Amino acid sequence: MLRTKIADPTRAGSLAHTARAKRWEELLRCFPDLAEMHVLDLGGTPAGWRVAPVRPARVVTVNLDPRTALHTESGITPVVGDACGLSLPTRLVTRRFDLVYSNSVLEHLGGHHRRKQFAETVHSHAEHHWVQTPYRYFPVEPHWLFPGLQWLPFPARVAVSRHWGHGHVPRAGRAQATRDVQEVELLSASEMRSYFPASTIWFERFAGLPKSLVARR
């Protein structure tokens, strides 16, 4: 299956696995003390840190899915909550975090207002951050693995989602396919800079083309 060969980050040798390894190299170059840090992961899960090359001293994950809180890991505290306008339990905010981390979440939040709230959460919880999102102008849409899908008219995107089953989003009926398409909004570099004006925007590249954006500080 196309997804397994290209976009499965757990499959050694896949393009996604190679890209994620390079992204981790850059993250550790920017934050060499990650193993000693107190990290807030917006949209992440304990399972994601289980396979991470480096695990911080303490991690708090925030996710809307209650299933992410069922399995805990040593040093990782899962919280079921909304990263837009986040309110953490007092016991978890005895001091500011060293780093706010987020991977492929910003494009799923649902509009400018919620993305702005998300950015405010990032800025208010730590001095440093690493926020990644796919780049709108990479030629292959990363959720469906379909060339140019993000530039098609809305009805055409729904039709593709109903019949194309090679990406991360499964084929579905019209109603679910419509929701799936509505839920993904890829960002441009200008939009990313507007949410993180004091950050450096790093372009993660594939075959020389910008594949994703990382706001880092």
Image: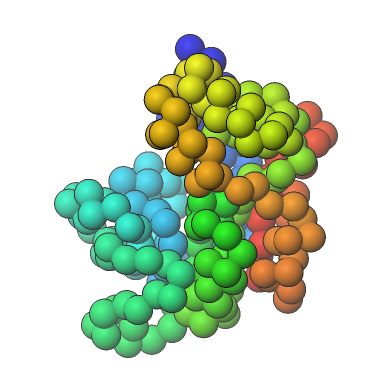
Residue found 43% across the figure and 83% down from its top: 96
Q: How is colour applied across the structure in the image?
A: rainbow
Q: Tell me where residue 153 sits by quadrant.
A: top right
Report if residue 155 is visible in the image.
yes
Q: Residue furthest right?
A: 208
- In this rendering, the answer to whether 201 lies above or below 21 is below
- Closest to the observer, 207 or 140: 140
The spot of residue 89 in percent (x, y) is 26, 80
- In this rendering, the answer to whether 111 lies above or below 127 is above
Q: Tell me where residue 129 sits by quadrant.
A: bottom right
Q: Residue furthest left?
A: 70
Residue found 22% across the figure and 49% down from its top: 67
Location of the C terminus by quadrant is bottom right
Report if residue 98 is visible in the image.
no
The spot of residue 113 in percent (x, y) is 57, 69
Residue found 74% across the figure and 66% down from its top: 193
> In the figure, is residue 193 to the left or right of 77?
right
For the image, the number of numbered tags is 0
The spot of residue 24 in percent (x, y) is 57, 48
- Closest to the observer, 147 or 78: 147
> In the figure, is residue 216 to the left or right of 86?
right
- In this rendering, the answer to whether 34 lies above or below 66 is below
> In the figure, is residue 167 to the left or right of 217?
left
Residue found 40% across the figure and 25% down from its top: 173
- Closest to the observer, 134 or 157: 157
- In this rendering, the answer to whether 20 lies above or below 91 is above
The spot of residue 88 in percent (x, y) is 32, 77
